[in-house]
């Protein structure tokens, strides 16, 4: 077989990598272009990227940051979440969601997920609300939006803030509105595996001027002036700090790459949607495999393609993972539930059953998915999965 996409870990026996970042010659040009400036951070390209991102998502403000973890941390800080507070998060998510809450001193409280889409369960959110609850932090898992109308209703009834973890969901819409606009903030990741990459990077969107200016300030140590302002008037060293902030800036090179990637994001997402539709059509009738088919695929960023291995499949999930790997196909699991981590044992709470997430953990498997995946690569995955089932 002609090898088209190579493995990130340089394993030559890999025929279908799990993910391949979408980097085109124009991205290299964008990076080179940014390098021509002698202002490599806190400059005009960041502003341009923020403007384009807020236009793309339909939000009033966008603030570029170093990654989605810092986006979540700054959002929680800007909303005044602190020690003694509780924030409800799903049990199935990347550790960053919980860690950002822990950075503030508040306690992450685990809610269960829906068995049919792995998004946070509304019933479980309700069961976890108490007097200490200050916010709900839903994750739009794999690119499918959570039911934001129901989450908004719950937040209004209980006077709670919403911070949306949109790390998987650049290009995801719910009721014709881009995700991230339902809560006080929406937090995006530009990590290499994400739908848009700046290698490392992130963005916060918000429709509140007050929250935007607080986050903008806190991403740069709490310093009240930008570099340009400091060097345009008066003494550049004579700046003040309004509060204790962080160095969570997004530099000009990454911003330039992000700006260029954003121009073709819809095209890249469409390719992901096509690949998911093809997986759906070919795996639909395989006994023992359950699919998470989203009827609203065009509103879904299709960040991950997750299947569920049922009892009547000939192999269990771990055996299937190993056998696929032997055939040169990389797969993964998103995610090990947070309640299974030793580190979190004494740090996270829950007031609900987590049976759904715990049951699903041994059954879910994420298949290779990236915009430029070929039909040949998809067929290899599909036919290998079919071959193992008698
Ligand atoms: C659901 C979720 N939240 C947050 C993050 C953190 O993103 P970053 O690596 O940009 O900090 C990730 C990254 O993988 C994620 O998948």
Image (cartoon, rainbow, N blue to C red):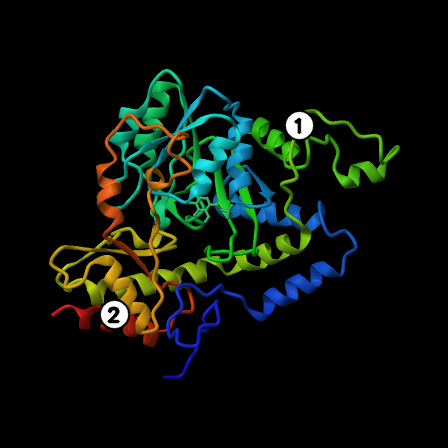
Q: Residue furthest top?
A: 131
**Comes first in the chain, label 1 or label 2:** 1
Helix, strand or loop at disc 1? loop
Rendered location of residue 207, percent (x, y): 52, 33
Q: Quadrant of residue 210?
A: top right
The answer as to whether callout 2 falls within 8 Å of ligand 1 is: no
Q: Residue furthest bottom?
A: 1
Q: Is residue 21 left or right of residue 325?
A: right
Residue at coordinates 51% horizontally, 23% vertically from top-left? 82
Residue at coordinates 55% horizontally, 27% vertically from top-left? 78
Rendered location of residue 90, percent (x, y): 34, 37
Rendered location of residue 239, percent (x, y): 80, 30
The quarter of the image holding the C terminus is bottom left
Instruction: Classify 222 as above or below 178.
Output: above
Viewer can see residue 390: yes
Instruction: Classify 381 as above or below 295.
Output: below
Q: Residue furthest right?
A: 235
Instruction: Classify 150 as above or below 281.
Output: above
Q: Is residue 17 left or right of residue 314?
A: right
Label for residue 382?
2
Q: Is residue 105 left or right of residue 110?
A: right
Q: Nearer the viewer, residue 290 or 35?
A: 290
Rendered location of residue 13, percent (x, y): 39, 76
Classify mark 2: residues with Cα within 10 Å, few (<14), some (14-19) or many (20+).
Answer: some
Q: Quadrant of residue 372?
A: bottom left
Label for residue 244?
1
Classify mark 1: residues with Cα within 10 Å, few (<14), some (14-19) or many (20+).
Answer: few
Helix, strand or loop at disc 2? helix
Viewer can see residue 204: no
Q: Nearer the viewer, residue 333 or 27?
A: 333
């Amino acid at each position: 077989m002609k090898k088209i996409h190579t493995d990130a870990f340089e394993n030559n026996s890999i025929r279908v990598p799990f993910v391949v970042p979408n980097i085109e010659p124009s991205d290299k040009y964008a990076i080179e272009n940014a390098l021509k400036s002698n202002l490599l951070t806190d400059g005009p390209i960041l502003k341009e990227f923020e403007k384009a991102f807020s236009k793309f998502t339909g939000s009033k403000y966008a603030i570029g940051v170093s990654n989605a973890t810092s986006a979540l941390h700054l959002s929680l800080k800007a909303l005044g979440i602190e020690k003694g507070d509780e924030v409800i998060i799903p049990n199935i998510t990347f550790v960053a969601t919980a860690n950002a809450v822990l950075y503030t001193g508040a306690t992450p409280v685990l809610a269960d997920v829906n068995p049919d889409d792995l998004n946070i369960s509304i019933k479980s959110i309700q069961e976890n609300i108490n007097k200490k609850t200050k916010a709900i932090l839903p994750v739009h898992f794999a690119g499918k939006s959570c039911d934001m109308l129901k989450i908004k209703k719950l937040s209004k009834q209980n006077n709670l803030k919403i911070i949306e973890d949109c790390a998987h969901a650049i290009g995801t819409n719910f009721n014709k509105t881009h995700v991230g606009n339902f809560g006080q903030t929406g937090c995006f990741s530009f990590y290499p595996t994400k739908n848009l990459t700046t290698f490392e990077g992130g963005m916060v969107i918000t429709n509140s001027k007050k929250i935007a200016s607080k986050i903008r300030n806190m991403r740069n140590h709490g310093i009240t002036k930008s570099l340009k302002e400091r060097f345009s008037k008066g003494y550049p060293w004579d700046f003040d700090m309004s509060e204790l902030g962080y160095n969570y800036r997004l530099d000009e090179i990454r911003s330039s790459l992000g700006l260029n990637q954003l121009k073709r994001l819809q095209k890249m997402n469409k390719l992901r949607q096509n690949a998911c539709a093809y997986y759906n059509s070919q795996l639909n009738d395989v006994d023992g495999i359950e699919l998470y088919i989203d009827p609203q695929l065009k509103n879904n960023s299709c960040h991950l393609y997750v299947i569920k291995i049922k009892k009547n499949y000939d192999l269990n999930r771990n055996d299937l993972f190993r056998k696929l790997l032997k055939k040169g196909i990389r797969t993964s699991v998103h995610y090990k539930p947070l309640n299974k981590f030793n580190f979190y044992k004494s740090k996270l709470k829950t007031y609900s059953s987590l049976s759904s997430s715990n049951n699903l953990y041994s059954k879910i498997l994420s298949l290779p998915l990236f915009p430029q995946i070929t039909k040949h690569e998809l067929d290899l995955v599909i036919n290998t999965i079919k071959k193992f089932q008698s």
